[in-house]
Image (spheres, grey):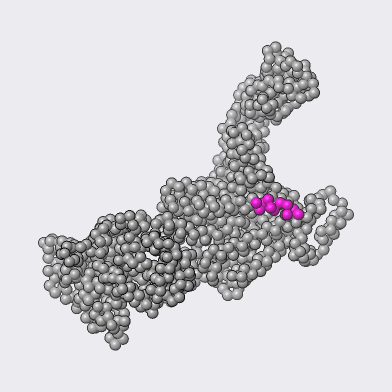
Amino acid sequence: MTQQQPIPDPAMFTDDAFEPLHGELRVQKLTRPSLSYWQDAWIRLKANKRAILSLYIVIGMLLFTILGPQVWRVNPAEQDLLQVSSAPGADRSAVLVAPYRPWTNIPPAPIKPGLKLVGQATTQKVQLIWAPIPGAADYRVYRDIIAPDRQAGIYGLPLGTTGSASDTYYEDLLDLRAGTTYYSVVAMNAEGKDTAKSETLKIKLIDGITASEAVDRGLLKPDAIPPLGTILQLPLHPAGTDYLGRDMLARLMQGAQVSLFIGIVAPLLYVLFGIGYGSIAGFLGGRVDQVMMRFADFVVALPFLLFMILFKIGFGIGPGESGITPLIISMTILLWPGTARLVRGQILQVREEAYVNAAQLLGARTGYLVWRHMIPNTMGVILVTLTFAIPTAIFTEAFLSFIGMGVAPPTASWGSMSNDGIKSMLVHPHELFFPALMISITVLAFNLLGDGLRDALDAKMRSRE
Amino acid sequence: MLLYAIKRLILGIITVWFIATATFLAMHAVPGDPLSGDKAMTAQIRQNLEKKYGLDKPIGEQYLIYLNNLAHGDLGISYTQKNREVNDIIRENFPISATLGIMAVVFAGIGGTLFGALTALYRNKWPDTVIMLAVILGISVPSFVFAAFSQLIIVKINTALGFSLLPVAGWGTVSHILVPSMVLGLGTMAYLTRLMRSSMLEIVSSDYIRTANAKGLAQTRIFTQHQIRNAILPLVTVLGPAIAAITTGSFVVELVFAIPGLGRYFVQAVQQLDYTVIMGTTVFFGAFLVLMVILVDLLYGFIDPRVRLN
Amino acid sequence: MTQNGSGETQPPLLEVNDLKVEFDTYGGTVQAVRGVSFSIEGGQTLAIVGESGCGKSVTVQTLMGLVPMPPGRLKSGTATLRGENILGQTQIGGKDFRGSEIGMIFQDPMTSLNPTMTIGRQIAETLEVHRGWSRKKSLARAVELLEMARIPEAAQRAKQYPFEFSGGMLQRAMIAMAIACEPAILIADEPTTALDVTIQAQVLDLMQDLQRDRGTAIILITHDLGVVARMADEVAVMYAGQIVERGSVDDIFYRPAHPYTVGLRAAMPSNNPAAEHRLLPIEGSPPDLFSPPVGCAYAARCPHAMRVCNTHDPAPFAVGKGHFGKCWLHHERVPGGAQRIVSAIAGATTGDVVQPASANQGDAR
């Protein structure tokens, strides 16, 4: 203290400045309000932006699951065969065509070389005609959705041959899909091999729908049929359709019900069982505790997913069952020990804590001890465990459904939808993308929420600051 | 230490017995019996088969036969592939899964340590943000999605290049291992990164790092000599569960990448309800995982002087 | 200030002026250190005394650059080692002064050493870094240092890990580590708090012997007045982030100039069984440092509080040579104020006085 601070001018003091103080004036008020455990936890959680965003996502997901089907009233099992595997935002227009009749009035072959389209190219039929290619013994017709590679002789799907050099026409009725399509006609030699001579035509196929089909689908009224060639709008599928033409959005909602049901009910069940088992072991202590926990150790040692599969087989799924119940039971049987260990440990620990002893010595009743000390000190951990258990359960369901061991078709779950989608992933990525996205977002949200809760409820962290 | 190892081994054998019993019980809880799936079976053939597989005996006796065979390392004969022993199937297919799994563990371990250390070093700066974002994705996206999208990307790259840079699926060469093992290790790597980060951060605020600072050591020295080594220790303890996760993860990856490993075989057996193969592989995987956990624990004891010397 | 032969004033070994440190927490800003000034010369022992949370550890940790910033923040102040600034930096002339010029030991030796590195390596490391010695030479020196710290079988012990040591041995190893490079100052942050009473004496003896042999200055952070009486030459009493009294050890024990010092004395157990002595706790709790009071921080607990104490922060009043008390009772308008403080001792302790080290060192041993 080498520097002397100036002593304030005595003139600034009032006359009674040096009077001794008594009573109330002496107490300094605490400026911070005292908060209960849960109030404090909530304030911390609210400060965590990621956790709050995740909470909104979880709520949004629940709304999507529960209210979604009320808003988007489309039957998830109904097949829209005109829009199979259509991507979201795909062209929904369909042209009104006459009912199909065999192609009889074939026009003469054009003189100019090249491939020509006869009539309108719709998903009902595509009729092609071309000028004879010199030297061709026969013609083979190919179709592809990408431009053919003429150098390599890759033209796509071989549709068939015309049968003779004179037949220079072809009608394609095979499994037509709307969109850009490349037709190639390759001249064949006498040995039946493709030659390098070929003609290619790029056309845009649009959906064709007959009046009766349109009436069946409710797109037209039977008493007001517009003329042929009218463009109709097919039903909207905001998330596209799957490989059977089912509405993806409706299926995602149905899948959400299954996935979230399993994801929430299974953890709830096994966490509850774990709490019961763990608290009994913890409260009884001694030999009972040892035997109970040793058994739990063995259950932990079971390879989880393998036994999920075994139990699923063990329960067996009869026809018409969704496989949800066996999944939940299997998860409960296998996953309870984690919570049981945790709760037991917490109870043993809290029982030994000095503050519990102190409270006992001060005459606290058991009820007060449980409410004031046991609950806050175990509830936090249990809540966090539960939050982390949900993504694990969703993952497990997805994993099992993916390898065909989860919910049975036709029940949709995000996992089984991913399994369906992966088969046509290269051509129709949206069929995998949407269910995968739903799983990822949900798991992400629950994980972040769990992180936030853990940080908010961790009493140790609170005292550290 | 030796006593500890023996104790762990005995406990491990009991655990394997427990796994085998649970497997047996689960399989015998199946409504009907393993042969009921085959409808075109006459009563005579059925009787012969029941006799052959011992299914006509009471369940207690079946259990004893099963345990006896197991003790001799005999896992039985496949139901669907006649005259193929489960042992042969494991011998043929497990090395492939093991190669893939080891690569995945190595990839996850190195990546997890490296990225975890980086995030702790650049805490709250952009490398931390970027890596932790990737980690959250790695934890939240199912492995089959990664597998599928990596295949998609390989196809796109191959198409763009005009030649096959990496094979999309299959097995045989080194390039076949690369992508599947990365996909397989991804989830574990994300988990290890997270663990490494929190472990590093805990150590940063520990008393002995404060001491190291008070000694005037350079930050790089503190980081390499004091922080990393202590931070890796908790990573070793989760290596057991990590191996388990990678083992089961291999089912999906082998399925998607068409790798002829034991995982894919197991899934196929499950789909075809080939009971002996299911039981055999389950017990095998169970025993393998128990062994791995014991090995990892012993390894940990070796690395951590506190455990080694006690 | 010391005068050397030529009459020039030399800067003190360590001088700290008006140090203010704050911490940003989610509940607000904590003003942990609120204008601390002190200085120390070679061979001297300065004890900084105060209850938990008064800012004594933060003060020295700030000097050592051990306070993480953020959340910590240096608000103002200077600190110089032989006239060179050390505040907000860890190096003087390109060399880290920590470990070489100032050594430090901590409260909990059990957690303050790297659990996976041998004791010998941890000591040798300091020498490698500051002296540039080889690994082998450093290790050999580490064994000598352990011997100096009275660790039996030092050569074997150097190869052991911290968990194989007892608490007292660890703290002696910590001291060996802190003095490895023969620093001019040794900061001991509650060095005996985590130790058994019987071990405490060993550690304190070791520190005193090393100081006598090498002329090391010691800054001793403690809340134990017994330790202060035994070790200190100079004492600074801290309360709520400020030094409220500074003086020689005799001043503090016999002529306290602040009611808080008196309160600390009264709350301390006596080692004189003959004396009739009741421990008197200081009523109330320290002020909230999120928003410290305008006036004297101790006013709310002070038995002599006056109206002015709640409205104006007292300045340090000089009450003797190198003896300051930060209390309004020394103001000229309070005649006999200083007597009020001292008279409180007589009332509280009925003549039982702890033996300060300088007063009767022979008995204290």
**Which residue occupies the extreme right position in the image?**
B44
**Which residue occupies the extreme top position in the image?**
A111
Q: In front: A265, or C360?
A: C360
**Residue A81 horizontal/vertical position (percent):** 67, 33
Q: Residue at x 61, y 45 (%)?
A: B178
Quadrant for residue A333, please give it: bottom right
Q: Is residue A40 visible?
A: yes
User: In the rendered image, which quarter contains the C terminus of chain C?
Assistant: bottom left
Q: What is the magenta segment's predominant secondary structure? A: helix
Quadrant for residue B158, please give it: top right
**Which residue occupies the extreme bottom position in the image?**
C274
**Which residue occupies the extreme left position in the image?**
A11
Residue B17 left/right relative to B161: right
**Residue B173 horizontal/vertical position (percent):** 66, 44
Q: Where does the magenta region start and end? A: B88-99
User: In the rendered image, which quarter contains the N terminus of chain C?
Assistant: bottom left
Residue C90 left/right relative to B296: left
**Residue A431 horizontal/vertical position (percent):** 61, 39
Q: In front: C266, or C301?
A: C266
Up-down relation of residue C301 to residue B36 (above or below): below
Magenta span includes A358:
no
Q: Is residue C174 visible?
A: no
Magenta span includes B96:
yes
Q: Residue at x 34, y 61 (%)?
A: C98
Q: Residue at x 18, y 75 (%)?
A: C340
**Residue C281 horizontal/vertical position (percent):** 30, 75
Up-down relation of residue A76 to residue B226 (above or below): above
